[in-house]
Image (cartoon, rainbow, N blue to C red):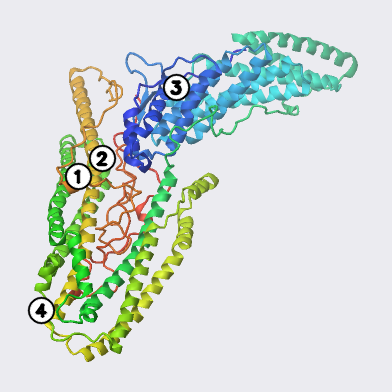
Amino acid sequence: MEFIAVPIKRTSEQDLVRPLKSIIASSYSTADNPADYADAIQDMNKLRASATWKSFDKTESSLEVLYRYYDQLVATEAKIPAQEVTIYFKWKDAFDKGSWLSGRQSLTIASFAFERVCILFNIAALQSQIAAVQNFESDDGLKMAAKMLQHSASNFHYLKTTVMSAIHQEPTPDLNPETLAALSQLMQAQAQEAFALKAIRDQMKEAIIAKVCAQCDDYFGEALKAMQRESVKSLWEREWLTTVSLKQSLYQGLAEYYQSRICNADKKVGEEISRLQRAESLLRSAASRGGDVEAWGVYAVRAQQALTSAKKDNDFIYHERVPDPKALPPIGKAAIAKILSQPEHYSRDFRDLFAQLTPVHVQQAMATYEVRKAELVNMEVGRLREATQTLNGVLASLNLPAALEDTSGTALPASIREKAATVRGDGGLQAIQAQLDDLPELLTRNKEILEETQRMLDEEAASDDQLRGQFAAKWTRTPSAKLTESFQQNGAKYRQILANAVQADAVVRAKFDANRAGIELLSRPEAELVAATPRGEAGVDGGSPAAQRLRALMERVDAIKSDRDALECQLKSATTDLKAKFLEGLQADGAVSESAISEETLATTYGPLRTAAAESLRKQEELLAEVQEANTEFVAQRGSGGSSRDTLFKDLATAHDVFTELRGNLKEGLKFYNDLTQLLLTFQNKVSDFCFARKTEKEELMKDMTSTLANQTAGTTPTPPQSQAAAGGVRQPPPRPPPPATTAAASSAPPATSGDATPNPYAGAPPGALPYPIQPQAAMPQPYAPFPFYTPMPGGFNPYGTYPGAMPQQHGYGYPYPQQQQQQQQQQYPQQGQQPYPGYPYPRQQYR
């Protein structure tokens, strides 16, 4: 008895090393050093080469080669977003032998899911081939055949239900769901056949054999109907339909024959005769139609002999009426061959080569949680810093604590000396001036990158529009505007970011100019500062009740500031690793409930800290009221609060506070510009790849249209178009454009990574909101989707936001940015399960 075996799909050679290195290096914070995964990537490449180019023996060891690669594909696909995959896999149709006119039908898609589908098809095909070469005269051969055919049927059935969601395109005929359904039913029928052969060979009870054969008849009947559908009928070898039809007749005849033996034992002679008549007709018809079914002609002879004997007994003894075969009770069925569930891993001792890479859904959840956490921390730290600056501004306007320390009227108060030493230690006026001078150059660099990126998009769109106008309806490729919508949206966001940065730079410059004189004076040596300070007429009575009260209040002010600094450190340093929780949710439910887990964790981790921050703000309000009351009494006793010396001390205190603020803002501003450069270069590279691919596609279409027109003019048959993959390889993207020259400060700044805890300076929004796109709001078309995981700027405190109750500008403590409405979290990340637009360069890829 011969079994039908499915042919294997063939593919083109593909190097995975360079694309995988690029994907991992650009998309995963755990791969800052691409060399860490060099060995794993090489192993992955070897797995593919073995699984696609090796000449397979019909043994289980050959299956293990496919199993290892398939398991690795499943693990890798779960971690690398589909939009990031730029590896083009080309697979040919398994049933198309090709011809000198049309060539082989094939499909090329940049998708690990497509590669996985094709490998699983080959696993199922090879399983059927292994079953077909077994020795059916042995128990071991029949067991192996039954095992392989059941697995093959299960794999084809799984492919039938998942292939369309995996590739999002019109598949080649072998991957059509109707084709896969027919193959699954055929393999299941043949697996049941192997069980029937073993039951017959083991001489099991006739009732059991009858039921097993009846199920074979049913399975082969379903397979024959599926294979005769018009959409798939032309795929099969000429003998396949004939063989399936013969086997259906054969096992229907065998089921009737063995059921007649049961009737003979039960003395149901009329039913026995009716079943034998039908069995003899079916078995003789099957045996006479040739093929390996001829060996079963012996059963036709047995049925004939039994029928002759039964008729004789009925004529002379029983005289029972022979019922119509259609009126006979149906034979019971025993479905032994069944569709099996998919195993977790096919290969033995599976080892994930990229175990350290985080699954996509978990990575999205972790990134979303980090944004939630950054918003909360930004808001709380911002409130604390704003309150501290308000406190400093009030004290500076009251000349505290300098007024308490000015007991001689000639020497510098201790607080002024400390402020001057701090300014000098941090570089003084020159350090601030140097950082301010770096900002325009960094801004220009980012503008140039963004302008060049926009120029490429505009040039590509103009070219497409020109050709669409020239060729009208003949120019059928997807319009640029539809493919570049997300690119344009992200470009607009980046332009708004730069506009916000320009405003912030202007405010920083204005604040510096307004306090330049005070900063310059604090930057001088102490002797020069003393010489520039006016003398006072009288000292301060440090023992007066008002002075003692103010001094006690100043100690409380220092305590609040110290507690607030510690609280800010706690807010910034609090860490929670939710990876394990997200992985547990993904394994248990198949999805990550990020919102519920994140909110619960944030409440647990930051709830007590937020309570402490609110209490600190409440204490400050009470303390300021007491300070102002005590200072009024102190000034009344002193009687010299409006002197030029007091005015200078106030200005110097304000200059110190502004210097400290500007130093932090400028440090974060420089980091902002350098981090933004990395994002813009990544954005530019994506656009460059897209434009290169569009240009290549345009040239191919132009070539095909020119060839078609030329052939039509000559009256010849058009030459089938050749695709990039058929022409012998995979397109490589153009070289990355070099980044513009940068200053030493810019070049030394590290690129932004999602794990960086450094504050984000130029957010331009209220606490927590990030003005740049953490992630595109709509998925880009495959295969040139723009970075579904933007490397986000670190989400720390934003010193350039405006918070409620900011210090009035006359004290120099306001914040540059106006308030902006925070974006909702769900707008920053696409929902899980969101499917990318199956677009350029293959909107609906047609096989050839």
Q: Quadrant of residue 458?
A: top left
In the depicted structure, whether residue 293 falls above or below residue 123:
above
**Which mark sits nearer the N-terminus, 1 or 4?**
4
Image quadrant occupied by the N terminus: top right
Q: Give the Cα distance between marks 4 and 2.
A: 62 Å
Badge 2 is on which residue? 686
Relative to 70, 525 lies left or right? left
Above or below, 195 relative to 565: above
Do tag 4 and tag 2 residues touch (Cβ < 8 Å)?
Answer: no
Task: Please report contact status of discs 2 and 3: CB closer than 8 Å, yes or no.
Answer: no
Residue that label 4 marks: 534
Which label sits in the foreground, 1 or 4? Answer: 4
Name the mark nearer the viewer: 4 or 2: 4
Q: Nearer the viewer, residue 36 or 545?
A: 545
Q: Residue at x 31, y 54 (%)?
A: 758
Disc on the earlier residue, 4 or 3: 3
Placement of 720 over or under 31, stated as above or below = above
Q: Earlier in the sequence, mark 4 or mark 2?
A: 4
Q: Secondary structure at mark 2?
A: helix
Tell me the CA gap for discs 4 and 3.
87 Å
Spatial separation of the CA atoms under disc 1 and disc 4: 46 Å
Other-residue count near label 2 (Cα within 10 Å), few / some / many at <14 / 14–19 / ≥20: many
Quadrant in which residue 659 is drawn: bottom left
Neighbour tally class for label 3: few under 14, some 14-19, many 20 plus, Cα within 10 Å: many
Write down the residue under mark 3.
51
In the image, what residue type sits under mark 4? Answer: Pro
**SS for dot 1:** helix
Task: Judge whether residue 517 can be spotted in this image.
Answer: no
Q: CA distance from mark 2 to mark 1?
A: 22 Å
Q: Nearer the viewer, mark 2 or mark 1?
A: 1
Discs 4, 3 touching: Cβ within 8 Å? no
Label 1 belongs to which residue?
747
